[in-house]
Amino acid sequence: MAGLQEKGRGAEAAFTLLRVLLPVLLALVVGGLILVALGKDPLAYYRFVVERGLLSPIGLQASITRMAPLLLIAAGLIVAFRAGLWNLGVDGQFLLAAVFVAALAPSLVAGGLPHILVILVCFAVAAAIGAAWSVIPAYLKAEHGINEIISTLMMSFLGVSLANVLIKLPFNDPSTTVPQTATLAVEDRLARLGGTTIHWGVLLGLAAVIGVHYLMSRTSLGLKLQIVGSNPRTAIHAGIDVRRLTFLAFAISAAFAGLGGAVDVMGVQGTIRADWNPAYGILVIPLIFLARFNGWAVIGFVFFFAVLMIGGESAARRMGVPTFYVLVQVALLLVFFAVVEMLDHARQKRRGA
């Protein structure tokens, strides 16, 4: 009997692994077929991706650096999704916080504030801006039951638009010919690790994902958030304050998105030009679902995607492929993830019958 149980657990673990990896493999295969249709060599493209994003020391450092904002956004999305909330407004929260930090940091440095205080103030402001931008969707969801998918997407659109207005008007650097914020000097940005180009914001991102994983799996707050996400009616009958936890989950999720913006500005960008929007939030969402909301798995998928982004940018230049081709890969990931989930749901339904 014990042997059968062990065999069953092993088979289930293998199926879970296949369910996670299959969408990735299918996305790569179909993406390769699209490259063939465009007259490009898919093997050469993927080889350039691996060489530039993983095997090259400079490329590997760039890939790890790119992980920093992605990890912070992922940490926030894990909280929201496990609480049953679709915070699809992370791009607006990210960009709006980034713009405020890009304008604030050079001013604080010019005012003579110590470097560590500049970082702490900017991080606090970024988290507050992100959280504040989630208040309206949280209120509409908690008080009136309005679907947060629509409200967060609308707030994201408003946040991106407002960020561009701020860059072109009050935060514009008059010493430049293009609309952008003042530039934060390289020596005033986040410190690098061990003589590399990797800044310590990556460590902050790793700590955030691991901390959120612990929060959601080992604490009473995490358990309450998951109960709210899985069955709000049960949560209400259990005496859980669903309204308060809805506000809290939105605030935590959006605050991490804001921190992602601060880390990207103070670690890499140094300034933000008008119409800049990396749309990291939409890119991270499928990674969260592929990882099944598991923090450790999220780190692995974020690293994989960072390599794909950095390597893909180089491969696109070498092979004449559009730089946004990586978005095609993301779309394929979403499609095949949905297909695999549908098949798994049908399998479980048959087993239950």
Image (cartoon, helix red, strand yellow):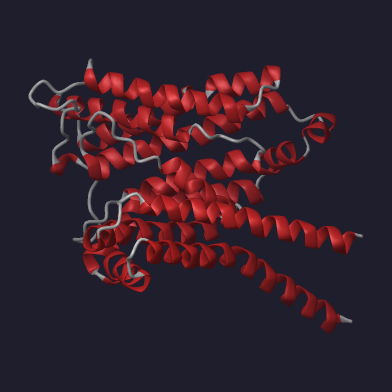
Relative vertical location of residue 168 with respect to residue 217 in this rendering, above or below: above
- Residue 30: image location, x then y, percent: 49, 64
- Front residue (pair 30, 310): 30
Residue furthest to the right = 353
Q: Is residue 128 visible?
A: no
Q: Would residue 245 be found to the left or right of residue 92 on screen?
A: right
- Residue 2: image location, x then y, percent: 85, 81
Q: Residue at x 26, y 44 (%)?
A: 267
Relative vertical location of residue 242 with respect to residue 21 in this rendering, above or below: above
- Residue 111: image location, x then y, percent: 15, 23
Relative vertical location of residue 162 with respect to residue 41 in this rendering, above or below: above
- Residue 57: image location, x then y, percent: 23, 68
Q: Residue at x 65, y 57 (%)?
A: 339
Image quadrant occupied by the C terminus: bottom right
Residue 311 location, quadrant: bottom left
Q: Would residue 61 be found to the left or right of residue 252 on screen?
A: left
- Front residue (pair 58, 202): 58
Residue 198 location, quadrant: bottom left
| Number of numbered markers | 0
Image quadrant occupied by the N terminus: bottom right
Residue furthest to the bottom = 3
Q: Residue at x 76, y 30 (%)?
A: 240
Q: Residue at x 80, y 29 (%)?
A: 236
Relative vertical location of residue 133 with respect to residue 115 in this rendering, above or below: above
Q: Is residue 273 visible?
A: yes
Q: Would residue 211 be found to the left or right of residue 168 on screen?
A: right
